[in-house]
Structure formats: C-alpha cells, structure tokens
C-alpha cells in the first residue's frame, strides 16, 4: 500500500512541479553551469547503494572548498524552499526511496552506526521523515538517529500522512534548513555505543 501511495503521489507531484523544475534547471544552467543535477551514491534499503538526485546548489570545489563559499545565492534560495529536493521524486518513482522515511546519508557512515542506528536501513529512505519535521539540520546527529529509529518502530500510514502534512508547514516556515552557523550538517564521526 505504501508503494502504491508513493507512486501515485510522486507522479502527481512530478506533473504539478514539472514547469517549476524546468525553470529551476534553466536558472541553474545559466547561473551555476553544468551539471544541473547533483548525483551522489547513498545507502538505500538494507544499505544497498543507489544514486540520489538533487538540483545542484553549489559551485565546483575551488580554493579552500568550504561549503559556505561554494553555496550560491540561487542555491540558498532553492534550499530555503526545498526546491533542490524535487528531483528525488524520480528516486521515489524508481522505487529507491519513499516519500517518508529516514533521510539517505553518506555511504561512509554505514560502518559508524551503532546496532540501533543501523535499523534505520530496514526501511526505504525518504524525501522527508520524522527527524525532518522535528528539527531537520538544526539538531545533532544522535538526536536525529533516535528520531529515525523511533519512526522505524512506529511507522504507519497515519504517521506518514502526518509527516507529509507537517513537512509542508516546515517548508513554508523554512525551519531547520541549516545547522547553526554551517550551511550543511557537520560530518558524522560515530557514536560511542553504551553496552
């Protein structure tokens, strides 16, 4: 049932947002250059790798290569309204992601998770999730993982609908986009597991 809902909603959203996505693609090509899409390998269900798609928001790495300097004004605008996430609807259609689930993080984090944190990969990753509506990038890694594992244990269609509705509100309020003074989350370096 969840897969059916994912397909119906994502295909509907792709149809509705297609004109906006075309405009965004043109703006990126003119202001940032090629490629238009940011593509990166991420772990999916059971840690199986897939390529996640986002609209590109940063310049290619130059100089000190800091994200703060690489993030463009257009990129800030796209992130502010979560428009950079729209291409992930393609990942949902392909069955690599769900609309709701723990966010797909970096492949290099797989070996750093505690046993409990690894359970986030027993469901498909999502465009939005319980952690996204409860702090997004403004909360620390450990808290984010607690929220992810809570979702895994308590997932339901009603909860997914609640998360989708609250996501719309969060996007409109533009909450939790950045982590304190950084434009992106600091890298996860592991959690000391309590025995």
Image: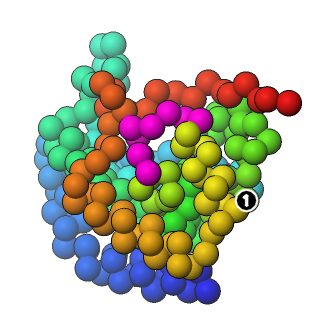
Q: Image check: 71 left or right of 159?
A: left
Q: Residue 124: within the magenta?
A: no
- SS for callout 1: helix
In the rendered image, the vertical position of residue 11 relative to residue 177, given as above or below = below
The residue lying toward the viewer, choosing from 121 and 147, is: 147
Q: Quadrant of residue 176?
A: top left
The residue lying toward the viewer, choosing from 102 and 149, is: 149
Residue drawn where x is 34% and y is 20% of the image = 66
Range shown magenta: 134-142
Q: Quadrant of residue 150?
A: bottom right
Q: Image check: 43 left or right of 144?
A: right
User: Where in the figure is residue 41, as x and y percent of width and height?
Assistant: 57, 46
Q: Image check: 64 left or right of 47?
A: left
Q: How many marks?
A: 1
User: Where in the figure is residue 123, as x and y percent of width and height?
Assistant: 67, 63
In the rendered image, the vertical position of residue 93 relative to residue 56, given as above or below = below
| Callout 1 crowding tier (Cα within 10 Å): few <14, some 14–19, many ≥20 | some
User: Where in the figure is residue 117, as x and y percent of width and height?
Assistant: 70, 43
Q: Residue 136: within the magenta?
A: yes
Residue marked by disc 1: 122
């Amino acid at each position: 049932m969840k897969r059916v809902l994912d397909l119906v909603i994502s295909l509907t959203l792709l149809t509705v947002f297609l004109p906006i996505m075309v405009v965004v693609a043109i703006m990126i090509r003119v202001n940032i250059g090629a490629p238009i899409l940011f593509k990166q390998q991420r772990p999916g269900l059971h840690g199986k790798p897939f390529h996640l798609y986002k609209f590109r928001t940063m310049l290619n790495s130059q100089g000190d290569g800091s994200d703060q300097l690489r993030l463009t004004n257009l990129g800030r605008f796209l992130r502010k309204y979560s428009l950079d996430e729209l291409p992930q609807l393609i990942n949902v259609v392909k069955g690599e992601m769900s609309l709701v689930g723990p966010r797909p993080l970096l492949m290099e984090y797989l070996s750093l998770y505690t046993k409990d944190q690894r359970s986030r990969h027993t469901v498909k990753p999502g465009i939005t999730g319980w952690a996204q509506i409860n702090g997004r990038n403004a909360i620390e890694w450990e808290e984010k993982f607690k929220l992810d594992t809570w979702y895994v244990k308590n997932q339901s269609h009603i909860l997914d609908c609640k998360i989708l509705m609250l996501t719309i509100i969060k996007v409109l309020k533009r909450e939790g986009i950045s982590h304190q003074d950084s434009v992106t989350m600091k890298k996860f370096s592991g959690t000391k597991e309590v025995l």
